[in-house]
Amino acid sequence: IQLTQSPSFLSASVGDRVTITCRASQGISSYLAWYQQKPGKAPKLLIYAASTLQSGVPSRFSGSGSGTEFTLTISSLQPEDFATYYCQQLNSYPRYSFGQGTKLEIK
Amino acid sequence: EVQLVESGGVVVQPGGSLRLSCAASGFTFDDYAMHWVRQAPGKGLEWVSLISWDGGSTYYADSVKGRFTISRDNSKNSLYLQMNSLRAEDTALYYCAKDQILGSSSVGFDYWGQGTLVTVSS
């Protein structure tokens, strides 16, 4: 299963609302996770099952979607949110492929 | 506190071999499947391999099948990746990651190590 994220690069300002889209090449129900990765750090799980917030993740992050189209929304960007975001499908056991990533930069 | 600590990454020549290790602590290791994920310099994440909680089932990405072997020693809370016939395109930061389970399904990788760098170069 191929995952395509859009956009690949996103420039935004503190306080902005931003949305990242992840499209799957075939239906994956709600078996989708989102990760945040900062430079030099390991990825961090933000959302699983498409819309469930991982414990400890701020509520400004939200996820939605099912089937083939999913979104990650950050309601009000904070300085610490500038990072690269990846989606991952967990429907096609065990080859849990990732999207190519979306780099979120400060405008 | 859950911790995953990888080791074993070095510079190796093409065609060479290497074994990576991942030491786990802070959770019941033999309750969970474990994964290796890699990231080439400046690139995205690539799932590499999965091993079931008991080591009885193993799976690989097509890019490494037949060359890499995942294993675990639950008595030592350790995960391993034996890498043979290494190629330049295997150069990457290798992470071990813990499965997060909801019901009987994996829903993500909730803990990751800091990664260990493998460089394949002559």
Image (cartoon, coloured by chain):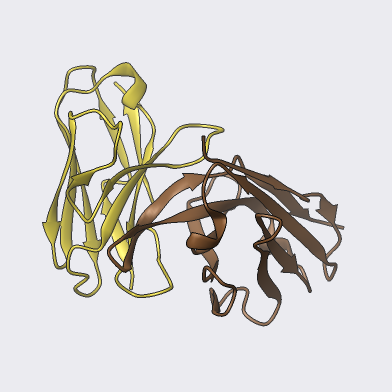
- Based on the displayed image, in which of its 4 quarters is residue A46 positioned? top left
- The residue located at (42%, 73%) in the rendering is A94
- The residue located at (28%, 29%) in the rendering is A11
Which tint is chain A?
yellow
Q: Position of residue B24 (x, y in %)?
A: 62, 48
- The residue located at (85%, 67%) in the rendering is B16
Q: Position of residue A62 (x, y in %)?
A: 17, 39
Q: Is residue B58 left or right of residue A36?
A: right
Give B33 or A93, whichever is nearer the viewer: B33
B103 lies above or below A82? below
Q: Quadrant of the C terminus of chain B?
A: bottom right
- The residue located at (24%, 66%) in the rendering is A24
- Based on the displayed image, in which of its 4 quarters is residue A4 positioned? bottom left
A75 lies above or below B31? above
- Which chain is the one coloured brown? B
Q: Is residue B111 left or right of residue A48?
A: right
B85 lies above or below A20? below
Give B110 or B47, whichever is nearer the viewer: B110
| Number of numbered labels in the structure image | 0
A95 lies above or below B42? below
List the single residue furthest toward the bottom.
B66
Q: Position of residue B27 (x, y in %)?
A: 52, 47
Q: Is residue B68 visible?
A: yes
Give B55 or A5, whichever is nearer the viewer: B55
Q: Is residue A34 left or right of residue A63?
A: right
Q: Is residue A99 visible?
A: no
Q: Position of residue B25 (x, y in %)?
A: 60, 44
